[in-house]
Image (spheres, grey):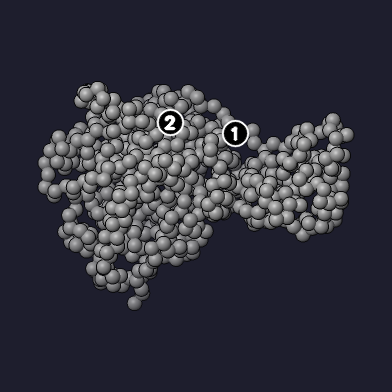
C-alpha cells in the first residue's frame, strides 16, 4: 500500500462539511465540549547525556619523528611492545593527567590519552585541566596520576565515559525528547542549503521500510499557530521540502509567501492526514494573516486539494508499530568487551531508546560500566554464541542469574549470511585490509589471526598488536569492514601501513614478500553493493563509534561502493569514520527528536577557528604526497599480488558513488 493517498473531489466535500469555520465563527463555539488532541507518543526514556558541545583541541604543529626499526622492549603486564627508552616513550594527558606510553596516546602530537580528552580540552579552560593545575603548583604528577598500560583506545575512552555516566545516571529521567539548545535542523539546513539523506536509506530506522512516496507537495493537517483563538485549531499545509523525518511546511493559501513556513517532524503527533479533523471533530481555521484573501474558504480548499496527496489514514499506527522494539530491559546478551576487543562478556539491557540499547556489564555493581549499541549491531549476540564459534569469552564472577534477568531469545539478533568454508577459505596468516576498530578513520594492513566457526575471523592490525592478542577483533567473512589486498589502491583510499614500517610508499607486493605471507583470495570477500541511495553531501545523524553513546550531526563526504565516509560537522577530518551504508549506527535527520535521544550539535565556530591552519596545510601536503605515490597501475597490482590469476579491478574515482549490485573485483573466466 502506498504511503500517500489521493484525495477525490467528493471526499473533500464530505471532509470539509461541518469542520471548517472562521476565527469569528469559532468564538461562539469555544466552550463546546471536544475530544482531546490525538497523541501518538507517551514519551521514551531519555539517554540523559551531556548536552554541552565539546570542541577539538588546538593541536601542536610539531611532527612526531618516526620510530626506528630496532628499539628496546618494554614489558607491561605481560604484554610486550617496542618503544623508545622509558622516559622519552612516556606522555601525560593534558586533559585528565593520565600518564602512559606515548605511542598509545591519541593523535600525532600525543597530547591526549583519548578522543574524549582531545574533544573536551577546549571546552574546559587550561586552568581546569589537571596538567595545568600541576604546572601552576610547580609540582610533577603525583602517584595518584594513574599510569596507563598499553590498552586499546576503546579502554581509555571507556574510562572517561564511565566517569561521566556516574554523574549523569543520577539525573536519568523519562522524557519524550531532549531539545538541543541553540541548534535546529531546520535552520541549519535552510541557512546552508543542505540536503538530507531520505528515510528510505535507513532500513533499520522507524518507517525506513514503509516510508512510501512521501515527498514535496503532500498535504497534511497541522495546528494553526497564526491564530488568536484560545483553543487549539488546525489548518492544511503542504510539504515544501523534506529533510529526513523533518518537513518544511507552508499553510495553504500562502502561495509563494514563505514568511510563516515552519519545520515539523512528519512522524510527530501534531501531523495528520487530510480528513483527520473531520473524523476527530477538530476545526479547520485559516491563518489570520491570509483570512481576508478569500470569502469562501471551503471552495478554495476543495479546488486546491482535489487530486492532491496526503498521508495514509493509518500513518500514525505505522509509526507507532515501527517504534516497537523486541529487546526489553533485563535481557541478557553477549557483547564485545570494550576493554579487550578480543573477547565478549555478558551484559544486561538497561534501557532501549529508538532501538539503541544501553547494556550494563553483568559484573558492574553500580551500573556505570556500560556499552551502547543498536539492537542490530554485529557486536551483540545471544548467550552461548561465543562458545558455539570458539570466540574468547570472559566468564562472569556471578554464579547465577540475578532475579528478573533472562536470556534474550536468539531469533532477536541479526543473522549473518551463511558461508561455505568447505572449499577454498580464509586461513591464518593471510593478509587483507581492514577498518581499524580503534581508529575508524583508517583502513589498515591486517592479518587473519584465527579462523573461527560459522565464518567468523579474528583480525589483527599489523604493527600494533598486543603480544597476547588482546586487541584482536572479530569480523565475519561477509563483513563490509574487511577488504581484499589492493582495495584502497584501486579506490584511491589512503592505506595505513604497519606502525614502524619504513619502506614507503607502501607496496603490497614488497610487503608480502618480506613477511613471507599471501593475500586472502579476492573471491572470498563480500562484493555486494546495495542500491543505498546515499550521495556525497547528504546530512544525517550518526553515532560516534569511538564514543557510542553519542549521536552527532554528520555529513557523507565520500562514497566508495557501499562504504561511506562520515564526517562529524564542526570537527576536524581526523575524527571521520568509515561506515557501511547499511550500518545501524546511521539515522535520518530528526531521528533523535522522534525517539527522544540526545543529539550532539556541530562543534561551535570558536572550536573550528581554533583548528590550526598550518596543521591543515600539513594534512593537505600529506594527502598530495600520498596521491603522488599512487604510481602502481591496476595491471601491475594484478600481476604482482595475484600470482598469475586473471582479475580485473573495478577502477573507481575518488568519490565513486556506486548505487547498485556492482562488485569491487570480477574474476575473468578463461
- Left or right: 38 in relation to 462: right
Name the spot of residue 614 as percent of width and height, x first: 30, 50
Question: Between 359 and 238, which is closer to the camera in this rendering?
Answer: 238
Q: Which residue is mark 2?
A: 360
* Camera sees residue 460: yes
Q: Which percent across, then down, holds residue 669?
A: 36, 74
Helix, strand or loop for disc 1:
loop
In the image: residue 397, left or right of residue 592: left
Between disc 1 and disc 2, the foreground one is 1
Q: Which residue is mark 1?
A: 176
Q: Is residue 431 above or below residue 318?
A: below
Q: Which residue is located at x 43 percent, y 59 percent?
A: 559
Give the mark nearest the N terminus, 1 or 2: 1
Q: Secondary structure at mark 2?
A: strand
Q: Is residue 36 left or right of residue 328?
A: right
Residue in view at x 20 percent, y 58 percent: 504
Amino acid at each position: 500500500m502506498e504511503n500517500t493517498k489521493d484525495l477525490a473531489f467528493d471526499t473533500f466535500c464530505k471532509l470539509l462539511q461541518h469542520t471548517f469555520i472562521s476565527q469569528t465563527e469559532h468564538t461562539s463555539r469555544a466552550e463546546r465540549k471536544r475530544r482531546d488532541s490525538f497523541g501518538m507518543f507517551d514519551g521514551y526514556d531519555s539517554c540523559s547525556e551531556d548536552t554541552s558541545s565539546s570542541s577539538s583541541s588546538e593541536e601542536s604543529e610539531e611532527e612526531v619523528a618516526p620510530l626506528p626499526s630496532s628499539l628496546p622492549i618494554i614489558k607491561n603486564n605481560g604484554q610486550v611492545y617496542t618503544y623508545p627508552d622509558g622516559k622519552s616513550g612516556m606522555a601525560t594527558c593534558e586533559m585528565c593527567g593520565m600518564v602512559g606510553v606515548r605511542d598509545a596516546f591519541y593523535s600525532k602530537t600525543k597530547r591526549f590519552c583519548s578522543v574524549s580528552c582531545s574533544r573536551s580540552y577546549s571546552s574546559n579552560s587550561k586552568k581546569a585541566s589537571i596538567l595545568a593545575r600541576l604546572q601552576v603548583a610547580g609540582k610533577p604528577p603525583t602517584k595518584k596520576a594513574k599510569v596507563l598500560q598499553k590498552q586499546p583506545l576503546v579502554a581509555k575512552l571507556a574510562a572517561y565515559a564511565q566517569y561521566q555516566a556516574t554523574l549523569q545516571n543520577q539525573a536519568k529521567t523519562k522524557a519524550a525528547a531532549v531539545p538541543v539548545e541553540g541548534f535546529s535542523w531546520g535552520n541549519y539546513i535552510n541557512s546552508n542549503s543542505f540536503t538530507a539523506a531520505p528515510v528510505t536509506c535507513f532500513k533499520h530506522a522507524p518507517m525506513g521500510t514503509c516510508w512510501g512516496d512521501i515527498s514535496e507537495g503532500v498535504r497534511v493537517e497541522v495546528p494553526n499557530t497564526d491564530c488568536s483563538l484560545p483553543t487549539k485549531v488546525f489548518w492544511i499545509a503542504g510539504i515544501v521540502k523534506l529533510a529526513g523525518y523533518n518537513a518544511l511546511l507552508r499553510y495553504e493559501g500562502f502561495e509563494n509567501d514563505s514568511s510563516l513556513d515552519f519545520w515539523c517532524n512528519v512522524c510527530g503527533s501534531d501531523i495528520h492526514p487530510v480528513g483527520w479533523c473531520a473524523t476527530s471533530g477538530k476545526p479547520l481555521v485559516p491563518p489570520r494573516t491570509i483570512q481576508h484573501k478569500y470569502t469562501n474558504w471551503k471552495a478554495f480548499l476543495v479546488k486546491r486539494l482535489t487530486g492532491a496527496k496526503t498521508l495514509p489514514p493509518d500513518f500514525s499506527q505505522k509509526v507507532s508499530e515501527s517504534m516497537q522494539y523486541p529487546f526489553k530491559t533485563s535481557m541478557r546478551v553477549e557483547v564485545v568487551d570494550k576493554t579487550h576487543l578480543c573477547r565478549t562478556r555478558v551484559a544486561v539491557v538497561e534501557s532501549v531508546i529508538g532501538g539503541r540499547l544501553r547494556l550494563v556489564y553483568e559484573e558492574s555493581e553500580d551500573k556505570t560500566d556500560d556499552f551502547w549499541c543498536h539492537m542490530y549491531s554485529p557486536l551483540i549476540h545471544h548467550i552461548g554464541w561465543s562458545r558455539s564459534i570458539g570466540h574468547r569469552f570472559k566468564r562472569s564472577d556471578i554464579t547465577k542469574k540475578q532475579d528478573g534477568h533472562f536470556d534474550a531469545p536468539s531469533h532477536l539478533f541479526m543473522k549473518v549470511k551463511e558461508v561455505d568454508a568447505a572449499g577454498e577459505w580464509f586461513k591464518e596468516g593471510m593478509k587483507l585490509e581492514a577498518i581499524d576498530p580503534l581508529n575508524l578513520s583508517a583502513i589498515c594492513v591486517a592479518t587473519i589471526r584465527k579462523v573461527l566457526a560459522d565464518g567468523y575471523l579474528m583480525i589483527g592490525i599489523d604493527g600494533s598488536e598486543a603480544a597476547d592478542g588482546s586487541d584482536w577483533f572479530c569480523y565475519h567473512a561477509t563483513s563490509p569492514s574487511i577488504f581484499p589486498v589492493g582495495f584502497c589502491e584501486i579506490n584511491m583510499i589512503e592505506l595505513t601501513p604497519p606502525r614502524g614500517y619504513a619502506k614507503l610508499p607502501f607496496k603490497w607486493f614488497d610487503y608480502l614478500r618480506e613477511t613471507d605471507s599471501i593475500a586472502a583470495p579476492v573471491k572470498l570477500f563480500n562484493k555486494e553493493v546495495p542500491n543505498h541511495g546515499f550521495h556525497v553531501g547528504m546530512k544525517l545523524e550518526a553515532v560516534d563509534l569511538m564514543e557510542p553513546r553519542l549521536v552527532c550531526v554528520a555529513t557523507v563526504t565520500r562514497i566508495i561502493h557501499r562504504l561511506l565516509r562520515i564526517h562529524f560537522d564542526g570537527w576536524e577530518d581526523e575524527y571521520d569514520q568509515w561506515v557501511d551504508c547499511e550500518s545501524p549506527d546511521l539515522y535520518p535527520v530528526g531521528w533523535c527528536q522522534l525517539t527522544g535521544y540526545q543529539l550532539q550539535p556541530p562543534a561551535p565556530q570558536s572550536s573550528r577557528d581554533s583548528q590550526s591552519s598550518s596543521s591543515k596545510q600539513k594534512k593537505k601536503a600529506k594527502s598530495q604526497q600520498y596521491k603522488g605515490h599512487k604510481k602502481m597501475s591496476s595491471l601491475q597490482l594484478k600481476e604482482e599480488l595475484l600470482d598469475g590469476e586473471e582479475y580485473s579491478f573495478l577502477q573507481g574515482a575518488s568519490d565513486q558513488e556506486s548505487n547498485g549490485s556492482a562488485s569491487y573485483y570480477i574474476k575473468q573466466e578463461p
